[in-house]
Amino acid sequence: MNIKVVAEKAGVSITTVSRVLNMPEKVNEKTKAKVIAVMEELNYTPNWFARNLQNSRTNLIGVLVPDNMEQSSMAVAKGIEKIALQKGSNMILCNTGYNVETEKEHMHTLIDRKIDGIVFVSSALTETDIKYIKDKGVPFVFVDKCQASKNENVVYTNYDKACEEVVGYLADMGRKDIAFLIPNDQDSINRQKLKGYKEGITSSGLMCNEGIVVYADDSIEGGFTAANRIIQSEEKVDAIFAATDTIAFGAIEAMHQNELDSDRLGIVGFGGNQLGAIVEPKLTTVSKPSHRMGLTAGRLLFDLIDSKEQEEPQSIMIQSKLKIRKSCGNKERVLEIW
């Protein structure tokens, strides 16, 4: 059984059958109904396909993540998938690789396949792209604020305030020269983190003006190289705040190789990577509530899918938490969390 047999029995072209399967909105109702009836008669596709097609539901949602190897992205995806399964739907996971053109390609493919809704994680889309989605009538939710998320449904955490809190905490411990290691890629999230770091320097009254900002590859090697450069420079840095845990792991290795300890050089990361609990010294980090963000985004998306009326966009903030461990130099570590 193939598409040619369906086309011949329905008295239409193979192209028309293909459109019914992939772009049913481009086929008139009479022709679509005839093709669906033939497919059911020939058992060309499961009955659920035709039923969902007629109901404009596919029981599929799409989730676009920037890196499907990164712990935070996958925690978000797992949260969304949990809600999807509870709703009797399946999830298609797409990796954008931080490339906006790849993200657009995935978006168009999902829309053409009549997806029920889409979650964009750390998106690089523009307002023009969002207008296209709206014109197609596809519900969508953002995880993390971005250029296109203004006045749209978004679930996010407070990157800027969290980073300001870290600087304030280090300053309260007596750290005076706090360097900030940030990925070379200046996406929306990294810009929010940098903003928070600078506000923390100002509000804490530290003397290093706008701070000591060093750009690095978002890798252990990148963190090691950047931290090693700082340690061996004339800068009298007594703390390093890394915008990602991955960079922080490299900074810890640089600390070891330069025979320093956390009393001399405090290190803090961002992300809550589980490896932070087993490196030595254990990594103080800002724990991003990724799984909860995924659960919340999933619930919000299905509310939109099930709703018959357009509602005001929701902006939902989920608080991050600072986990105090040994790497920051706090000997008491009364807030240490494994």
Image (cartoon, rainbow, N blue to C red):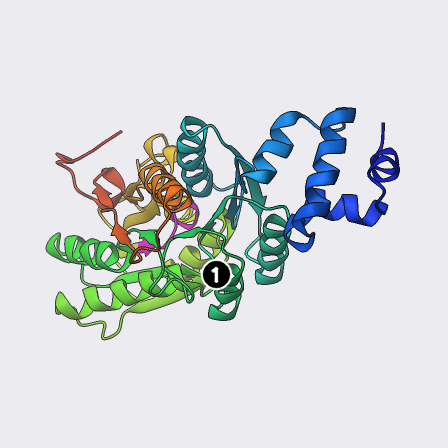
Q: With respect to residue 240, does 51 lie above or below?
A: above
Give the crowd class for mark 1: few <14, some 14-19, many >=20 residues within 10 Å: few
Q: With respect to residue 214, does 247 lie above or below?
A: above
Position of residue 187 measured from the top left corner of the image (x, y, whole percent) = 44, 63
Disc 1: which residue: 134
Q: Residue furthest bottom?
A: 209
Position of residue 323 measured from the top left corner of the image (x, y, whole percent) = 23, 40
Position of residue 208 measured from the top left corner of the image (x, y, whole percent) = 23, 71
- Residue type, mark 1 in image: Lys
Q: In the depicted view, which residue is nearer to us: 157 or 307? A: 307
Whether residue 249 appears in magenta in the rendering, the answer is no
SS at mark 1 in the image: helix
Q: Residue at x 31, y 44 (%)?
A: 288
Q: Is residue 314 left or right of residue 189?
A: left
Q: Is residue 204 left or right of residue 28?
A: left
Q: Residue at x 13, y 65 (%)?
A: 204
Name which quarter of the figure residue 282 lies in: top left
Position of residue 155 measured from the top left corner of the image (x, y, whole percent) = 33, 50
**Does residue 329 show up?**
yes
Query: How many labels were placed on the picture?
Result: 1
Q: Quadrant of the C terminus?
A: top left
Q: Quadrant of the N terminus?
A: top right
Q: In the depicted view, which residue is nearer to us: 258 or 181? A: 181
Which residues lie in the magenta part? 241-248
**Does residue 233 show up?**
no
